[in-house]
Amino acid sequence: MTPDRWLVVVAAPLEVRAVLDGLGGDAAALPDPWEVACVGDRFDVLHSGVGKANAAGATARVLDPRRHLGVLSVGIAGSLPGSGLGLCDAVGATRSILSDEGIGGDAGFISMSEVGFGAFPDGSMHAEHDPGLLEPFCTRTGPIATVSWCSGSDACAQGVVERTGAICEAMEGAAVALAARRIDPGIATAELRVISNTTGDRSSQRWALDDSLRSLRAVLGRIAQALC
């Protein structure tokens, strides 16, 4: 069997419906968490649930290298300080980074890779992606941080930038890539995010959830046209 489908991993129901609609599937037929909706000849849309544990577990449960030529983590994200990203911008990850795993102390943050417990096969805490894969469909490309706790203060958001150099943060991408690379080190991986909000102080955050979901739907439509 020659792999010819993309596994598209999506966390929350609103995101899943937007992705299904964009790819030409039935947005009303929402799969249960850790279940898949098949869309056409090229896409399996996996409803993972939110967060790293759900994302990694669901991906490991479903991914089949005999069927899937690549894995794409898709959803919305928060822009980080200094990124220059606007609401509804589409971002393709050059790198997906596990940003929270480490040791915190008075001297700062120490990543697990620095103490010999890197998560990825190469000993790092990140997955590199082919930058050209999503670039035609995105406003920007750059590093995306995968977080367990979202940045609700300016200090928290700045800390993510200092640790990772990321331009936005989401909650699943690096975990999806980690599961995929452990199953098949050579499989293609990618992460696509549309900016739904700013990060930092919660009282000052700006949000455009509905518009970002419409943008996500539009970007997936362009991807579907290009790949089908």
Image (cartoon, grey):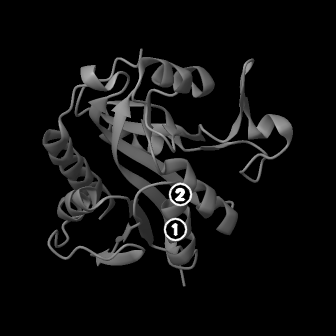
The answer to whether any part of residue 184 appears in the image is no
Most extreme residue toward the top is 82
Q: Quadrant of residue 206?
A: top left
Q: Is residue 115 left or right of residue 15?
A: right
Residue placed most toward the observer, 200 or 114? 200
- According to the image, label 1 marks what residue? 59
Q: Residue at x 14, y 40 (%)?
A: 211
Q: Position of residue 95 (x, y in %)?
A: 56, 38
- According to the image, label 2 marks what residue? 176
Mark 2 residue element? helix
Quadrant position of the C terminus in the picture: bottom left
Quadrant position of the N terminus in the picture: bottom right
Q: Position of residue 154 (x, y in %)?
A: 42, 18
Mark 1 residue element? helix
- From what the image shows, is residue 138 above or below residue 228? above
Amino acid type at circle 1 is Thr
